[in-house]
Image (cartoon, rainbow, N blue to C red):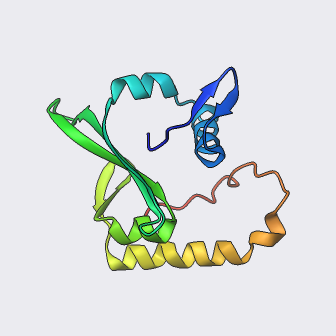
Amino acid sequence: MASDSKLVDGKVVGDPTEGALLVLGYKAGVDIDETRERLPRLATLPFDPDLQLMATFHTATDAAGRPVTRCFVKGAAPAVMARAATALCGGEVITWDAGLSEQHRAHMETHGRRGPAGHGRRYAGPRPGRLRPCR
């Protein structure tokens, strides 16, 4: 949702990084056009290099059917995590506290150290049984 790029005839129109996120969503089965129609955009905070993120605000409904405004954010993981108050895990809203933030920061740091060895390799996703719960 926090993307101004589009997929047109299988090609990315717009920012290549945003386009890569759209392609990922498409490959995961997300109907991008339907989602954009269902959640109309109200406002945009364009990417800010100082904040290292972009945000969009959309009309939505909550689980009880009440109108709400949803904010979708993308950006550098540390910048986004530093501003998070809650997260969605298995359909449940959980508090994004210092412990959870540290756990995920350490995971990213460990993953980042393996970075160059993975360049150029096809990523097929996690091996069965390797996904961990949010906590």
Residue 82: x %, y % from top left: 37, 72
Q: Residue 28: which quarter of the image?
A: top right
Residue 79: x %, y % from top left: 44, 69
> Image point 26% across, 33% down: which residue?
60
Q: Nearer the viewer, residue 97 or 129?
A: 97
* Residue 135 seen in the current view: no
> Image point 28% across, 65% down: which residue?
85
Q: Residue 38: which quarter of the image?
A: top left
**Left or right placement of residue 134 versus residue 61 in this view:** right
* Residue 23 seen in the current view: yes
> Image point 59% across, 44% down: which residue?
21
Q: Residue 112: which quarter of the image?
A: bottom right
> Image point 63% across, 56% down: which residue?
129
Q: Quadrant of the C terminus?
A: bottom left
Q: Nearer the viewer, residue 52 or 76?
A: 52
Q: Nearer the viewer, residue 11 or 38?
A: 11
Q: Is residue 103 above or below residue 20?
A: below
Residue 43: x %, y % from top left: 30, 41
Residue 69: x %, y % from top left: 22, 41
Q: Quadrant of the N terminus?
A: top left
Q: How many marks?
A: 0
